[in-house]
Image (cartoon, coloured by chain):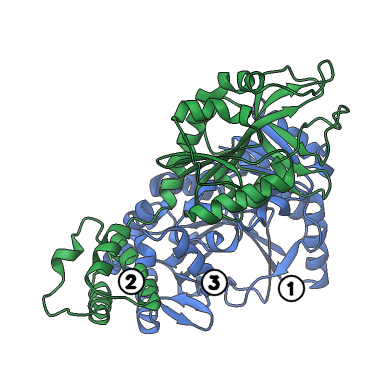
Chain colours: A blue, B green
Amino acid sequence: MFSTLYIEEAIRSHPRTRKILRRFKGRTVVECRHYGELLNLKSQNFRLQKKQPALILAEKRGKKILPAPSGYDIGARYNYYFSHVLNCVYDCRYCFLQGMYQSAHSVLFVNYEDFIDNIRQQALSHHDEAVHFFSGYDGDSLALEPLSSFSDFFISSLRNIPNIWLELRTKSTQVRSLLTLEPWSQCIVAFSFTPEDVSNALEHGVPEIKQRLDAIDKLQQKGWPIGLRLDPLIDSENFEQQYQGLLQQLFSVINADNIHSVSFGAFRVPEDFYAQMARLYPEERLFAFSMEKRDGMVSYRRLREQNMRDAIREMLLGYVKPSVLFPCAT
Amino acid sequence: MLIIHTALHGEARAFIRHFALKRQHDINAFACFQKDDTFLIESGIGKINTASAIGWVCGTLNISSPVILNIGMAGHALYSIGECYLANRIEDHATGHRYYPPQLADTSFNGHCLLTLDRPTKSYPGKCMVDMEASAFIQAATRFTTIELCQSIKAISDNRAKPARLMKDREVESLLAPHAKAIMCLADELRQYRAELMDNSCVVFSQVTQQWHFTKYQQKQLTGLLQRHHALQPHEELIGMVPTRIDSSKAFIQWLDNYLRNLPMKF
């Protein structure tokens, strides 16, 4: 997956670094001082790097958890997110990461223990009220699992704290380690989907819908709570037909009665990210359609967006209870 | 466009021969050689010469996102003379600034770090190769192109057992010549990456701008619209579809904008 590995000098002998290094035998290893030296350089091209991305092993300094943006919750009052990875191994054309980072290299922070300390403290500060922690905003939660052993460590470390809820958002099928763990009723494995035609056109390198459904099937049989994320909703001339087909496909495998949550929201990205994404991929159909700028964001026209949200809500209500539906902020 | 930078004539000779480059006698500031879309510039030794040469050649040619290679010699405490490496980390000894040219191309060269010094040395500090140009090269080149297309390739010319000394052009050439083929493969691959960044709608752009006069602002609008058209209808011959009533740049822009708005969204 990665031909080059960059390592911050300070964590060269960290046990997790050493473990990952053993899997990189024979490949190029380059030492750096700080991952920002690579990630923040201006004159680099995300699109070119995506063809041969590297992995950077680094230490997360400073704040490790942040309040989740409002309107992205799945039922709790207190919501935070954390990122043990920056950037994603997949290459989804609608993804805001293309506009946010100059580089396509993935960063994996190896100091998991510091994340756990921060999460624990934050949870304790809210006493007995449920606190949701989201993973997977800045990169797929599980895609690097064979290298990172992230889910194993985080779940084992957090499951004894009663008010913590954890969401692992993913498009990956790397669920082997979850299947070896005892299911935790407060850990939601949330899978993102778009209809097959859209996925084929825009989600490069992402496992097929059928493969993701196989992973969901195994997890739900084992007793893991499953979440569905229809975010972003991508418009097309046969939007309703495509999403009707997708839901049929999903709920032919997913047990709708046991689903934890379904969230949905139309494609939207901050204006400056959108401009950067369109500059990177001028030939991309998604960026060639007319969009609207509103409140610093670029999205579909307001009325169209509302119609899409109404339509998907209506479709979903044919499968699940209204209480598990969570429209995302517009 | 491929730009090759060397410090010395001996470092350039193998490439002048390979590409059959011709000396550009009308240029006095630097020795320059060119054929078609390959340009070679010899800067002289050191960071200031290098930065001046890269700035001059990129500014003069004014080409979007060129591939720029720095090819030359370097010392290393232990590596054997004649071995060749691709710099995967370039550090300026004086400032401590580091650059990490990403290795996108599938190349036979091993990667290694490279330290750029202000003065020649026989002490070979650290584990890196040492030279006197690369940090200036990468800093200057990345003002004109993206770092993936800037690479520094170094043949080992001296080590602890055989320290640096003045070398004749022919000796220098003999260090790099065995690697010329692999360097050209690397350049070709980078040129293919560069092609991906080029705008496919420029042929139509020139056809349209020959027909009507477009202001600078309109040219920018036109570029955006043509890119959108290429994305949505890549196989459609736009020029043949323009209605006969279109008689100005303004009318063309309005027509194309309207046409694109009404195309169905399909995946």
- Of residues A188 and B228, the one drawn nearer to the viewer in this rendering: B228
Amino acid type assigned to the residue bearing label 1 in the image:
Glu
Please identify, in this view, whether the residue under mark 3 or under mark 2 is nearer the observer.
2
Identify the secondary structure beneath mark 1.
loop
Q: Is residue B120 left or right of residue A171?
A: right
The residue wearing badge 2 is B222
* Residue pointed to by mark 3: A272
Q: Residues within 10 Å of mark 3 (few under 14, many from 20)?
A: few
Which residue is at the far left?
B244
Q: Nearer the viewer, residue A164 or B250?
A: B250
Query: Subunit of mark 3?
Result: A
Residue at (78%, 25%) from the top-left corner? B76
Name the residue located 82 percent from the left edge and 39 percent from the top edge.
A14
Residue under label 1, please give it. A129
Both on one chain, marks 2 and 1?
no
Residue at the (14%, 64%) spot, across then down: B240
Q: Mark 3 or mark 1: which is in front? A: 3
In the image, what residue type sits under mark 3? Asp
Location of residue B71 in the rendering, given as x and y in whole percent from the top left corner:
61, 33
